[in-house]
Image: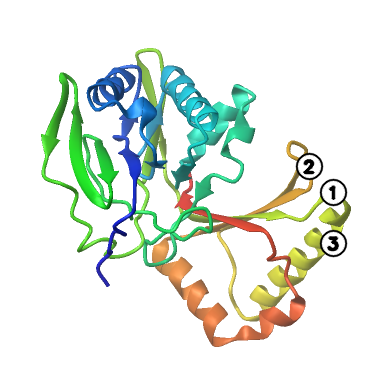
Amino acid sequence: MPNTVPSDFNAIVITPPARVDSSTIPAIQVVSKRHKLADFVGHRILHMHQVETIDSAAVAGLIDLIGRADKAKRLVLICDPPPIVRSYLDVYGAAHLLEGRVLSSANDGTYTTELASFVPPFVPNPKGRFDIYRNGNAKSFELGAHGTKEIAPVDLSSFPPKAPTRANRMAVHDGDADAEIKASGYVHVRKHNCGCDHTHVTFDKLHQLQAWFRNKGFDFQGLELWASDVPAGMVTEKMTFRDRMHFEQFQTLLKIDSGWKKIEAPMDDLEEEFYWKY
């Protein structure tokens, strides 16, 4: 079904390009200053699904954006951030900035959250895009090396056609050098916020689940379980599939045979991510 933007929807939606670096920040600042967005009353939404590389200057800009929005009491939502963003924030000691802000798309590509009545779906743009929604009407700007230019308003009528697929490669940008890391499979990550007193119970339930999967003839290319020290009380489950089709077969299994529900898996307060293994 086509997406209908509510008439009272006010938001700044930023879709960064594949490579986000120190040149991206000035381009965003130009748009912000020109349209007086510092005082804009509305949400700040970042669609980071197409980001493949990001440098420290851009991460510092992200930290500043979140800080300014928090100070102005604006809602900040970050949709499908790649693992490299989380890694950089960990290095900066700022991983807590993502808590309660990260959204992952549903299988049809839509976003649902109790924090906002509407979140526009991800609409790709290789150069990066800036959408300003005022009372449901959008103005769109394309980012470029020599500034920004206004383009036709983003058309949500045909989006999302399906759940977006993250790029199958990733490059870590360090100075002038890029080191490319090849993809080797489709990954489903589930973070179980179980609390410090229930970590062992969560591990036990997840092991029971894996045994159930294997008894059904289904196995994974890779499986990892680990508990987090910071923040404490979180168990992360990472399942690696051969490809998206293999992942979809797994989803079909869960729908056809609901016996796994009897295990009472720790699904409360669950955060999910989908991305290629880097």
Query: Number of callouts in the render?
Result: 3
Numbered circle sitting on residue 196: 1
The quarter of the image holding the N terminus is bottom left
- The reply, left or right, for residue 151 in relation to residue 15 is left
Location of residue 215 with respect to 192 vertically, above or below: below
Q: Residue furthest top?
A: 175
Location of residue 16 with respect to 194 vertically, above or below: above
Q: Earlier in the sequence, mark 3 or mark 1?
A: 1
Q: Marks 2/1: CA distance?
A: 6 Å
Numbered circle sitting on residue 38: none
* Mark 3, other Cα within 10 Å: few <14 / some 14–19 / many ≥20: few
Amino acid of disc 2: Ala
Q: Which residue is mark 2?
A: 232
Dot 1 falls on a residue whose secondary structure is helix
Q: Residue at x 11, y 39 (%)?
A: 151
Image x and y of residue 200, in percent = 85, 56
Q: Which residue is mark 3?
A: 201
* Mark 2, other Cα within 10 Å: few <14 / some 14–19 / many ≥20: some
Q: Are marks 2 and 1 in contact (CB under 8 Å)?
A: yes
* Mark 1, other Cα within 10 Å: few <14 / some 14–19 / many ≥20: some
Q: Looking at the picture, tell me which residue is in the foreground, 178 or 129.
A: 129
Dot 2 falls on a residue whose secondary structure is loop
Q: Earlier in the sequence, mark 2 or mark 1?
A: 1
Q: Residue at x 37, y 26 (%)?
A: 38
Observer-side mark, 2 or 3, equals 2
